[in-house]
Image (cartoon, helix red, strand yellow):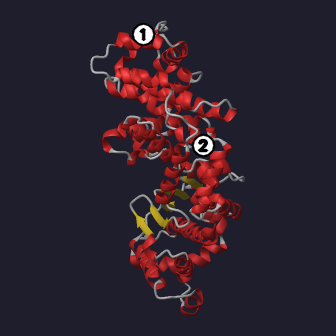
Amino acid sequence: MSDITKTKVDLAKIKKAVQVGIPLSITTYTFPHEAEVYVSEVITAFFHEINQENMTEYIIYSMNELITNAKKANTKRIYFKEKNLDINNQGEYELGMKTFKSDTMSNIKHYLNKQKEEGYFVKLSLQVKNEIILIEIRNNASLSFFEYKRIHDKIARAEQYVSVDEAFNQIIDDTEGAGLGLIIMILMLKKLGISSDHYQVMSNEKETISKITIPLTAYSLASLNELSKEYVDLIDAIPQFPDNINCINQLLNTPDMKLSDVAEKISNDVALTADLLKIVNSAAFSLVTPCRSVHDAVKLVGTRGVKNLMYSIGSLKSLEKFSPEQKNLWDHCSKVASYAKYVVKTFYPTMRELSEDIYVCALLHDMGRIVFNAAHPQMIEKFKQKCREHILSMDVFERITAGLNHSEIGAQIAEKWNFPDVIVQSIRYHHDPLAAPEKMRTIVAIVYFANMIANYQDNTVEFYQFEPVILKLFKISKEDQLKVFSDKLKANYGNC
């Protein structure tokens, strides 16, 4: 969605971005009419997806205003350069602005083509995360002191008006449009209950950023989490772990436990033996020689490894449902687990505990989505009733069941099943690794990275949507580097 030449809005990518809290970005050089229409359609779809349709009209106006202003700032760089005027010199700035509007409007095609040739762009980003809608307009031209002052003077002036009519009547200066559009935008935001404090303009030596932050109003993260807890409480159709696996976990927790006893216990269960050997011999473990016996498998993975594999197998059994969608979800999780294993082997080869924990943490990262998919109709009906009790619309219900809060739901189910905290937090924060508890941030970052690469390969996310801090952790700064690593994963684990 970073390329403005697209004419059809990708609703699946918008839904994905909302579900996982990643940014949507649109880049334009000239902002023609078709780009304006496309931006409006994306904003409409985005705000529909987060159940904030009442904001759409105001936000579309605001974005058109800010994009137009950013494009105008880029045009100004071309104009001042051609006039051989210094935009940072007050006298020359005032001289240039006397003719800027008339000169550029009479030959606008020339100036738009020039700014595209010289790489001046405008980028819109939309993101919803942690109860906040974040909207940014960036253009790669830094503000001069005089531009910065004018913008903040206009913001201050907007605070004096209570209506658009009053602003129209009092503004007589026609220079640069006198900022009427910006004033109208701030008045519109006020109608949404958003003060000018939520609108910021920042500039550095490389770019200018206009940022609007909007608190979610129709529902909050806290109410979603509470509703998710009630949903988990309703999951009486999903049992605790199978008895045979509970017995093995109890044995593993015995102080004088011997691995040989554990191996013998597993060997007595034909189905469990098959499941264990299947995982150990999968591409994720990259064994040179296939493991033929449970005794060898138990020795290979150790006590902690066996515990984690029991959590994996128990979850698979408890949530097993034979449907195409369920199979696709588990296939995705299996791929992410294999990718995460490879990431640990590549970047953290000496960290044994990380290596032992990563597979189960990655395999179960989408447990919340899997639980929704496996839910019985009568349980969904109970959940609908809970939504009605909370006076939530069915739109909100549909968004929750589609996975909007699946990370929290998965984490709460893991807690219900008494999983170790490292698994719980990996599920809870796999879309927001920077918010994870510090001691678990590395493992959560790996799960996030492996999951994003799997989504990248499926074309449901783009390079710009990766968290830059996490990319840096894995020594990736350019998309070409990500592609090389992604291709390596696909080559080694594409069939796992």
Q: Is residue 33 above or below residue 279?
A: below
Q: Which amino acid lies under the numbered mark 1 shown in the image of this protein?
A: Glu
In-image side of 78 versus 352 (left or right): right
Q: Residue 191: percent from the left, percent from the top?
A: 55, 79
Q: Which residue is mark 1?
A: 264
Q: Quadrant of residue 259?
A: top left
Q: Which residue is mark 2?
A: 372
Closer to the camera in the image, 466 or 17: 17
Q: Residue 395: percent from the left, percent from the top?
A: 65, 58
Q: Quadrant of residue 247?
A: top left
Question: Where the C terminus falls, by quadrant?
Answer: top right
Considering the numbered disc 1 on the image, is that residue within a helix, a strand or a loop?
Answer: helix
Closer to the camera in the image, 456 or 415: 415
Which-is-in-front pick, marks 1 and 2?
Answer: 1
Packing grade of label 1 (10 A; few <14, some 14-19, many >=20) is: few
Q: Residue at x 68, y 51 (%)?
A: 6
- Which numbered circle lies on residue 15? none
- CA distance separating discs 1 and 2: 36 Å
Q: Residue 90: percent from the left, percent from the top?
A: 40, 77
Considering the numbered disc 2 on the image, is that residue within a helix, a strand or a loop?
Answer: helix
Q: Which amino acid lies under the numbered mark 2 shown in the image of this protein?
A: Phe
In-image side of 331 versus 377 (left or right): left
Closer to the N terminus: mark 1 or mark 2?
A: 1
Q: Residue at x 48, y 45 (%)?
A: 431
Q: Residue at x 66, y 62 (%)?
A: 44
Q: Residue at x 27, y 21 (%)?
A: 255
Q: Residue 214: percent from the left, percent from the top?
A: 49, 67
Residue 474 seen:
no
Q: Is residue 13 above or below residue 248?
A: below
Residue 473 seen:
yes
Closer to the camera in the image, 449 or 78: 449
